[in-house]
Image (cartoon, rainbow, N blue to C red):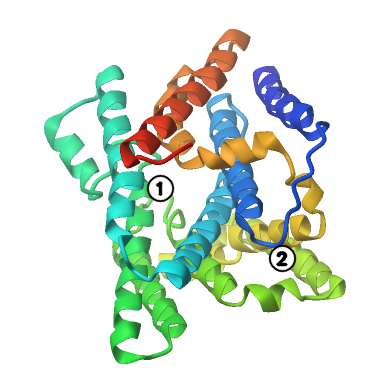
């Protein structure tokens, strides 16, 4: 436990050091800085929870689920905002350069360094069929989100139908298929509980101005009910009688665990934007995807030692930044 406390203290100090610095940046609800800071918070909670589990802290994994929900909300939001500006122009080129290539590089190097590399294993991982690590499920998940988003946009452009309903139906079908046929018996809720996160991000983007005008009272209600719902269903889904239910039924309940907590967090920071005005969060958010990729392997450094925990933080940060800078250079963009 003391090593986990040490790790938590490192993150808190890094946050507070940057928080006390004056910054004239002005945040508005769901603007670029706002969502970047949320991504920073989300990846830090994921890394914090995963490291905590490695250090023997029980019952902390659900925190990672909240972080993933926040990241997916921001991803859906960002794709919809990009679509409103540019349509589908260059959609797959961007996903290939910003998502696939960094993933392939990290997986190749990581598997080689950890002596887990096998050609078949790597190829199945690279085409998002069978993850090579315990955290690779997210890559498969986000790629399917991209495919559904792109397909729905193409369909709506041709048929001129309500794309939001099509998107929800598409994710509902995916939820049913995953729960009934593809659920992992160890964690059957892992993907299923996130099925509404990405579509919610798209919906927020479509209704941003309306949501931004919500009264303080309405935001408080969202905050309170989101928190209560998430905590309540988190407790309910831990009951043995619920775990014994068919996966489809228990996964429906799991939909009301991490997502409401993520919504409550967004409502909270929407009322207290000053908490996001932090260079540490913004920096972590900028390289959040790279941190996720790297930490799947750097977590092997986490052991019961102050030095090892410190090395884990340093190595993850450095490699994530190197990966980010390399990817920006490859795209010919200024950092």
Q: Residue at x 46, y 42 (%)?
A: 289
Given residues 79 and 190, the one toward you in this image is 79
Name the outermost residue toward the right. 217
Given residues 84 and 8, the one toward you in this image is 84
Give neighbour class at mark 1: few <14, some 14-19, many 20+ (Cα, 10 Å): few
Can you say whether 67 is above or below 260 in the image? above
Upstream in sequence: badge 1 or badge 2: 1
Mark 1, secondary structure of its residue: loop
Alpha-carbon distance for marks 1 and 2? Answer: 27 Å
Task: Kindly identify which residue carries mark 2.
Answer: 226
Task: Kindly identify which residue carries mark 1.
Answer: 186
Left-right relation of 26 to 72: right
Q: Position of residue 176 (x, y in %)?
A: 37, 72
Identify the mark at residue 111; answer none if there is no mark.
none
Q: Position of residue 179 (x, y in %)?
A: 38, 65
Left-right relation of 65 to 120: right
Name the outermost residue toward the bottom. 160
């Amino acid at each position: 436990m003391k090593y986990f406390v040490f790790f938590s203290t490192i993150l808190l100090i890094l946050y507070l050091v940057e928080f006390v610095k004056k910054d004239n940046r002005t945040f508005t609800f769901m603007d670029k800085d706002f969502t970047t800071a949320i991504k920073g918070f989300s990846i830090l909670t994921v890394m914090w929870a995963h490291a905590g589990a490695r250090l023997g802290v029980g019952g902390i994994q659900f925190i990672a689920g909240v972080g993933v929900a926040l990241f997916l909300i921001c991803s859906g939001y960002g794709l919809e905002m990009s679509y409103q500006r540019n349509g589908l122009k260059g959609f797959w080129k961007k996903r290939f350069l910003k998502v696939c290539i960094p993933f392939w590089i990290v997986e190749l190097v990581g598997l080689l360094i950890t002596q887990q590399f096998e050609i078949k294993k790597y190829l199945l991982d690279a085409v998002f069929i069978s993850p090579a690590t315990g955290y690779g499920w997210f890559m498969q998940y986000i790629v399917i989100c991209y495919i559904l988003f792109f397909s729905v946009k193409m369909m709506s452009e041709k048929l001129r139908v309500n794309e939001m309903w099509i998107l929800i139906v598409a994710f509902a079908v995916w939820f049913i298929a995953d729960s009934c046929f593809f659920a992992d018996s160890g964690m059957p809720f892992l993907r299923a509980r996130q099925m509404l996160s990405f579509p919610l991000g798209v919906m927020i983007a479509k209704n941003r101005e309306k949501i931004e005008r919500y009264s303080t009272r309405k935001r408080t209600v969202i905050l309170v009910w989101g928190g209560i719902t998430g905590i309540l269903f988190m407790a309910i889904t831990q009951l043995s009688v619920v775990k014994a239910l068919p996966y489809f039924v228990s996964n429906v309940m799991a939909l009301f665990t991490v997502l409401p907590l993520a919504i409550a967090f967004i409502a909270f920071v929407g009322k207290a934007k000053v908490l996001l005005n932090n260079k540490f969060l913004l920096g972590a958010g900028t390289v959040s995807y790279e941190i996720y990729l790297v930490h799947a392997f750097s977590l092997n450094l986490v052991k019961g030692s102050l030095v090892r925990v410190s090395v884990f933080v340093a190595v993850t940060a450095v490699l994530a930044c190197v990966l980010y800078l390399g990817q920006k250079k490859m795209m010919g963009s200024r950092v």
